[in-house]
């Protein structure tokens, strides 16, 4: 081999090495996370409190937030063997379906490694279990409240009702005054009806009754408290107290407008409404309270987890995904900033301290205090999307409107619900109620 | 040998289309049928349950309701848009300068997506800020109190009205195109024979567009059983199942209730209904002279 050839070969070798080295250096790990946010405001919040924070905490990892129009899109992708590494699922009931099909990983090992059992409230942690294994981590802590437009109440000389009787007396007065008592709309999402039945069943049927039914010790079909609570809701709707019987023809954003504009005096909705009111209707003078007592059940706070993060079974680096999840739940400063500045929902963490919330309005602080007190005093009720069997909830979501319209008898409705409870107890898919 | 080669050529030409059809139509159709025999949540492996899904379908009161709504939908769409489209096509075909203007105006709703049009009409039908305000202003009190989408007695017709609004312009364009293909000398001959306008229509126009009428009929019938978009956007099958149709019920089972196996069985039933109707319509069309043997 002559010198020229040797030189050429050497040069080629150097060039190859110079190309190869940067390529190896550029090989970065990647984590994709599903996201449902769509409008510019939501994207801005996500970028500030999630994207940027994650990039700063994991400088060697590329993060991609994959936006899905709805959960069906994610379902199809995961069913096809793909999907992001971290799935943002609708809640425990959703996670059970993914877990049943081995589409998400059990997280018990990571839970032990990072001490997640001690991190979350027991009820939230347990609600994420299926077949005695942990499959998701609850990423929101929410509950149902009654919201009053204080300007409407004050202008009419009305007080916040302290008992169910007072509420029942107040609503006809509101109708007489031309004010819609309760604003609600499920024209665009029929399932929103679960906010109402979850609240009414918990507050007037009683959490202990629901628990005994879900434990198989009582019957949804025959329990008088359950029947009376459902009947109360039906009566409210049929008397025109709920969106003047127009709830099926309007959307929840319409209902929010009615409330904010003073056309309606009240709403029964979740703690997530704080974000909507803060961002869209910052001038509304509102107050959120627990539903007034019926004399038997007092100050019940129906609670739920908002959604849950799970790790895709096809994730190439589940250890890193778990580390990312652990960061999300342990980055306190980021967590509080999200709640304080963007009205985000807090995680159901034992360490969550209302005293650390800053810059919130008095009404918002009161709301968080209500949540905190109810938790610490164990005055909790059960929202269907976390604590009812999935099939029962689907049935109730589809059929409660039929009760309102007298297209279905309450007997038939309650009996059908009981069949789903029996089936869930039998196949072991009954959620764990605290 | 040469003849054999030549005979193979057409098959090579249709082979790509055939392969695509097998991959994206035949195999998925077959898998739909196979999965209809499984208890499957749409995510993992199913459990074989034989004909249980089909037995459940025949006992499911919502399926009966949904099929009845599809039939009502069919009856609406086989009459109103066809009559409207045909009448408008006849009238517009007699125009000269302004024909394109009217064709465009009536066709525009067809190019608006169902999601957009559905949302716009939802707003119009809102009891608080929609058309009801207008009716109240002009003194139509009973109409101003109507719950177009909230009253189960009329909600299906309200949604059908919107789909009709979007659909009839397309039918009109199809009829107009067909009418323009008719040889003008046939009309001249009819006039020479003393035919009036109605007789021209009956003896020249309608026979002249028979294949188009047959096509529109069969497509309307099929689409009536496959329709999904406007119902899904505007009511999602509610309230109280009053607008539930087969397609929305299939969607709900597959993606909301995680009952993909049952949804597949419903798809099979839907396909069987469509195939039956297709052949029945073909038979009726032949008997009625709309189609040639």
Image (cartoon, rainbow, N blue to C red):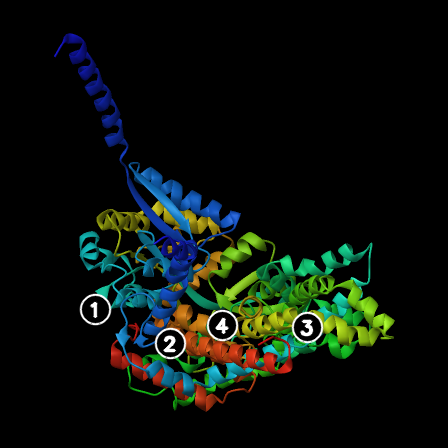
Q: Earlier in the sequence, mark 2 or mark 3?
A: 3
Residues tagged 4 and 2 counted as in contact (Cβ below 8 A)? no
> Tag 1: Cα neighbours inside 10 Å, few (<14), some, or many (≥20)?
few
Q: Which residue is mark 2?
A: B262
Chain of residue at mark 1: A
Residue A150, position as x, y percentages in the image: 60, 64
- Of tags 4 and 3, the one toward the viewer is 3
Query: Are tags 4 and 2 found on a single chain?
Result: yes
Q: Is residue A31 visible?
A: yes
Q: CA distance from mark 2 to mark 3?
A: 35 Å
Give whichever of A402, A296 is nearer the camera. Answer: A402
Q: Can you identify the residue that label 4 sits on?
A: B248
Residue A412: x %, y % from top left: 44, 89
Instruction: Give the x, y percent position of residue B211.
Output: 63, 70
Marks 3/1 in contact by CB < 8 Å: the verdict is no
Give percent across and percent down for residue B15. 40, 56
Query: In the picture, which quadrant includes the N terminus of chain B?
Result: bottom left
Q: Are marks 2 and 1 on the same chain?
A: no
Q: Is residue B174 left or right of residue A278?
A: right
Q: Secondary structure at mark 2?
A: helix
Q: Earlier in the sequence, mark 4 or mark 2?
A: 4
Where disc 1 sits, the SS reads loop
Marks 3 and 1, Cα distance to the nearest angstrom?
A: 60 Å
Q: Are marks 2 and 3 on the same chain?
A: yes
Q: Residue furthest top?
A: A3
The residue to which callout 1 is attached is A132
């Amino acid at each position: 081999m002559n010198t020229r050839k040797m030189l050429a070969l050497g040069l080629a070798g150097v060039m190859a090495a110079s190309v190869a080295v940067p390529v190896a250096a550029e090989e970065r790990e990647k984590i994709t996370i599903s996201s449902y946010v769509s409008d510019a405001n939501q994207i801005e919040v996500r970028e500030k409190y999630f994207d940027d924070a994650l990039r700063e905490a994991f400088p060697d990892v590329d993060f991609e937030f994959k936006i899905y129009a709805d959960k069906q899109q994610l379902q199809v992708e995961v069913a096809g063997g793909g999907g992001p590494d971290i799935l943002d699922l609708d809640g425990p009931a959703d996670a059970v379906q993914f877990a049943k099909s081995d589409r998400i990983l059990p997280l018990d090992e990571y839970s032990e490694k990072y001490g997640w059992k001690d991190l979350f409230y027991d009820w939230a942690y347990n609600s994420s279990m299926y077949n005695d294994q942990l499959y998701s981590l609850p990423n929101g802590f929410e509950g149902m409240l009654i919201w009053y437009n204080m300007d409407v109440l004050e202008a009419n000389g009305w007080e916040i009702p302290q008992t169910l009787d007072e509420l029942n007396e107040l609503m006809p007065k509101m109708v007489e005054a031309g004010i819609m008592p309760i604003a609600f709309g499920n024209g665009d999402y029929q399932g929103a009806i679960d906010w109402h039945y979850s609240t009414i069943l918990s507050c007037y049927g009683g959490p202990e009754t629901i628990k005994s039914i879900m434990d198989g010790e009582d019957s949804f079909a025959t329990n008088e408290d359950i029947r009376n609570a459902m009947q109360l809701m039906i009566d409210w709707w049929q008397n025109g107290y709920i969106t003047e019987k127009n709830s099926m023809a309007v959307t929840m954003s319409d209902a929010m407008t009615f409330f904010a504009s003073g056309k309606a005096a009240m709403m029964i909705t979740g703690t997530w409404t704080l974000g909507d009111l803060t961002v869209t209707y910052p001038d509304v003078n509102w107050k959120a309270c627990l539903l007034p007592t019926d004399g038997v059940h007092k100050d019940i706070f129906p609670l739920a987890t908002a959604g849950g993060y799970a790790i895709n079974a096809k994730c190439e680096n589940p250890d890193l995904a778990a580390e990312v999840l652990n960061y999300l739940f342990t980055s306190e400063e980021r967590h509080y900033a999200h709640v304080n500045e963007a009205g985000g929902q807090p995680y159901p963490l034992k360490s969550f301290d209302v005293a650390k919330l800053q810059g919130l309005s008095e009404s918002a602080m009161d709301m968080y205090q209500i949540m905190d007190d109810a938790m610490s005093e164990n005055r909790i009720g059960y929202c269907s999307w976390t604590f009812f069997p999935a099939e029962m909830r689907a049935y109730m979501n589809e059929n409660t409107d039929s009760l309102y319209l007298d297209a279905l008898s309450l007997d038939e409705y309650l009996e059908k619900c009981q069949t789903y409870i029996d089936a869930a107890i039998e196949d072991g898919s009954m959620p764990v109620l605290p | 040998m040469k003849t054999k080669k030549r005979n193979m050529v057409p098959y090579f030409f249709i082979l790509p289309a055939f392969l695509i059809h097998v991959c994206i139509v035949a195999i998925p159709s077959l898998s739909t049928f196979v999965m209809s025999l499984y208890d499957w949540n749409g995510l993992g492996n199913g459990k074989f349950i034989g004909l249980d899904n089909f037995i459940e379908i025949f006992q499911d009161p919502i399926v009966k309701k949904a099929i009845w709504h599809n039939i009502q939908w069919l009856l609406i769409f086989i009459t109103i848009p066809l009559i409207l489209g045909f009448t408008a096509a006849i009238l517009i075909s007699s125009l000269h300068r302004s024909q394109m203007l009217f064709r465009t105006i009536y066709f525009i709703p067809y190019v608006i997506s169902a999601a957009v049009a559905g949302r716009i009409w939802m707003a119009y039908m809102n009891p608080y800020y929609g058309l009801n305000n207008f009716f109240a202003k002009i003194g139509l009190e009973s109409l101003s109190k109507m719950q177009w989408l909230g009253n189960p007695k009329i909600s299906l017709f309200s949604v059908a009205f919107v789909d009709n609004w979007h659909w009839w312009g397309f039918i009109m364009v199809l009829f107009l195109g067909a009418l323009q293909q008719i040889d003008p000398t046939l009309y001249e001959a009819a006039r020479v024979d003393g035919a009036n306008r109605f007789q021209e229509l009956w003896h020249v126009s309608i026979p002249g567009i028979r294949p188009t009428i047959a096509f529109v009929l069969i497509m309307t019938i099929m689409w009536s059983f496959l329709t999904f978009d406007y119902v899904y956007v505007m009511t999602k099958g509610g309230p109280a199942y009053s607008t539930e149709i087969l397609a929305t019920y299939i969607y709900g089972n597959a993606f909301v209730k995680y009952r993909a196996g049952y949804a597949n069985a419903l798809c099979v039933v839907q396909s069987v209904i469509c195939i039956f109707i297709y052949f029945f319509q073909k038979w009726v069309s032949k008997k009625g002279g709309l189609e040639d043997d």
